[in-house]
Image (tube, rainbow, N blue to C red):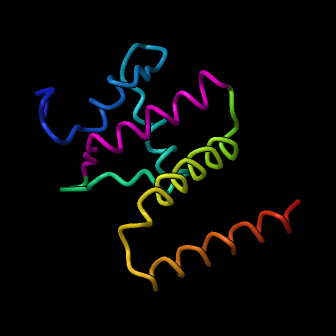
Amino acid sequence: MNNNNQKYKTIGEVAIILDLKKNDGKPNTHTLRFWEKQFKIVRPKIFNSRRYYNIETIKILKKIKFLLKEKGMTIEGAKNQINSEKTLVDENNISNINNSEKIKFKLKKISKLIKELKRN
């Protein structure tokens, strides 16, 4: 899995790509496991008890790292940011689905907004 052109990367390779290091300079895979628990959008393939990340998941992890480490956001803030970006992507693709799916999507969005308003 060390070839840069391969579709999937191991957790160690992703830690190196993201420049996540422990004090001893070794790749910090614990951070990736933690983010996996915190961000439901991060779902690596697991084969023989090993995690493998595709390009799209690595892009999401880069975004998470940027929001947490560079922008100084909290986990909750980063989750909200990523979820709002995902919603925008979903809205752009809504024209590709049938009417009942559009209604379900819009109801889900309204329900989410109501929950956010109740929290505030």
Q: Is residue 8 left or right of residue 79?
A: left
Q: Left or right: 4 with respect to 91? A: left
Instruction: Residue 99: give x, y in percent of width and height.
Output: 45, 82
Could you tell me residue 70's position as x and y percent?
60, 21
- Residue at (65% x, 25% y) in the render: 71
Eyeballing the image, is 87 above or below 29? below
In the foreground, 7 or 106 = 106
Q: In this view, does 107 lie above or below 28?
A: below
Residue 60 painted magenta: yes
> Does 84 appear in magenta?
no
What number of labels is visible?
A: 0
Quarter where residue 47 is shown = bottom left
Give the image location of residue 107, x and y in percent. Answer: 62, 78
Furthest residue toward right: 120
Magenta part of the chain = 50-71
From the viewer's side, name the closer residue of 13 and 86.
86
Q: In which quarter of the image is residue 110?
A: bottom right
Residue lying farthest to the bottom in this orientation: 100
Q: Find residue 76 and report its horizontal and vertical position in percent.
A: 69, 47
**Magenta: predominant secondary structure element?**
helix
Seen at 59% across and 24% down, the residue is: 69
- In the image, what residue occupies the spot 36% across and 19% down? 26
User: The N terminus lies in which quarter of the figure?
Assistant: top left
